[in-house]
């Protein structure tokens, strides 16, 4: 404890990409700017601006050849890397985990609070996670053995955190099902201040990493038949395959800066959210811009989309189901109230998250004194 305040350490899986989990860490750093961030590896060129001044301490994995680009190839080493992190002298360990960070070993005198984005997805949902990942034949033989070991480690370390926070109701159910542990829900923060209401134009929008599990191909194929404009912001390993599927009315914009992306949100007709996510910040960024969302009726979208108020659902992960929903949006998009949609998104803002997480940490820490 320092000056009557607990000494806090933040632990995160890896900092070599930009996504929702990394935005959560950015807000945790804003809450606790003096807390060091322990992680397996860090690519400082990809950090959000909010993390540029953070004290980031990577493990020995940082020195492995090619690890920043080929970090998945070293998957079997992450458990040992996190168990090697020394956390002596910290009163509160705050982990941000979708795989390994929850497995750190804390001092007996501290408490460990895990903000869980999901239990280890590739261990518990291996077949769906690996779908269309383009894994070679040798890797396909080796990976099931590695995943079995990782799943055993994940279960063995499930009790290391003293408290779990789930980012959505679906993740809360997984934590209970896989670990037998109760958790509370605190939805991730959305930087609603970055967005504003614009004037809708004639294009639909996707903002996403272009990974296979995001199911972007459903939208690409649907819009090929609909002949409506679709703009896709983002990049990733599935890009080439998606471009091969796309018709001329589908435009790939790669990764844009926050300002350019915010402008596209403000002026789109609606945002397409075709995959099943653990939570999904994109729908709320769209809502903060006053725009409705077309989302698969699954995952975290069930926590945030109110049918007819801030978006609509499609029921099956198929091109036909999504295309039907887009046709429905074409008929009703003028009925949505942009001001009401933005007001709803404000309830998921950074300040709401900071208040709830801060109160949770304070209560648990004081309760253990």
Image: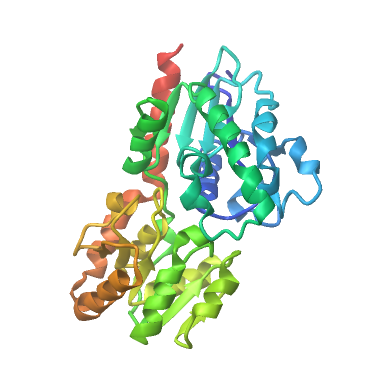
Q: Quadrant location of residue 69?
A: bottom right
Report the side of 181 relative to 340 (left or right): right
Q: Quadrant location of residue 338?
A: bottom left
Report the side of 28 relative to 223 (left or right): right
Q: Quadrant of the N terminus?
A: top right
Residue ID at (57%, 12%): 108
Report the side of 197 relative to 132 (left or right): left
Residue ID at (35%, 50%): 300
Report the side of 238 relative to 359 (left or right): right
Report x, y in % for residue 58. 71, 38
State whether residue 337 is above or below residue 160. Answer: below
Report x, y in % for residue 360. 39, 29
The residue lying toward the viewer, choosing from 360 and 114, is 114
Give the number of callouts.
Answer: 0
| Residue 52 in view here | no
State whether residue 366 is above or below residue 84. Answer: above
Report x, y in % for residue 266. 38, 73
Residue ID at (37%, 65%): 286
Report x, y in % for residue 249. 44, 86
Way the structure is coloured: rainbow
Residue ID at (33%, 77%): 269
| Residue 135 in view here | yes
State whether residue 364 is above or below residue 130. Answer: above
């Amino acid at each position: 404890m320092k000056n009557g305040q607990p000494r806090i350490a933040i632990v995160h899986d890896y900092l070599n990409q930009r996504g929702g989990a990394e935005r959560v860490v950015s807000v945790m750093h804003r809450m606790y700017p003096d807390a060091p961030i322990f992680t397996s590896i860090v690519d400082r060129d990809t950090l959000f601006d909010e993390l540029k001044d953070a004290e980031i301490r990577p493990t020995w994995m940082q020195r492995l050849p090619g690890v920043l680009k080929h970090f998945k190839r070293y998957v079997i080493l992450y458990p040992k890397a996190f168990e090697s992190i020394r956390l002596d002298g910290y009163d509160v360990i705050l982990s941000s985990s979708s795989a390994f960070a929850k497995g750190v070993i804390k001092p007996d005198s501290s408490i460990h609070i895990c903000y869980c984005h999901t239990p280890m997805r590739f261990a518990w949902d291996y077949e769906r996670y690996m779908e269309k990942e383009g894994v070679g034949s040798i890797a396909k033989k080796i990976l099931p053995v590695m995943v079995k070991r990782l799943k055993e480690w994940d279960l063995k370390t499930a009790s290391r955190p003293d408290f779990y926070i789930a980012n959505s109701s679906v993740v809360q159910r997984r934590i209970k099902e896989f670990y037998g542990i109760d958790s509370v829900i605190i939805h991730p923060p959305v930087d609603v201040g970055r967005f504003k209401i614009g004037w809708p134009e004639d294009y639909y929008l996707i903002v996403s990493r272009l990974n296979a599990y995001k199911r972007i191909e459903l939208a690409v194929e649907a819009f090929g038949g609909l002949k409506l404009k679709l703009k896709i912001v983002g990049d990733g390993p599935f890009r080439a395959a998606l471009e091969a599927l796309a018709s001329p009315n589908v435009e790939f914009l790669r990764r844009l800066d926050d300002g350019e992306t915010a402008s596209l949100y403000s002026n789109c007709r609606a945002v397409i959210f075709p995959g099943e996510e653990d939570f999904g910040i994109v729908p709320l960024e769209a809502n903060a811009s006053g725009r409705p969302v077309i989302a698969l009726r699954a995952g975290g979208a069930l926590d945030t989309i109110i049918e007819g108020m801030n978006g609509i659902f499609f029921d099956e992960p198929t091109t036909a189901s999504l295309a039907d929903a887009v046709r429905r949006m074409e008929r009703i998009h003028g009925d949505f109230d942009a001001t009401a949609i933005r007001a709803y998104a404000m309830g998921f803002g950074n300040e709401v998250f900071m208040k709830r997480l801060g109160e949770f940490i304070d209560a648990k820490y004081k309760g253990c004194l």
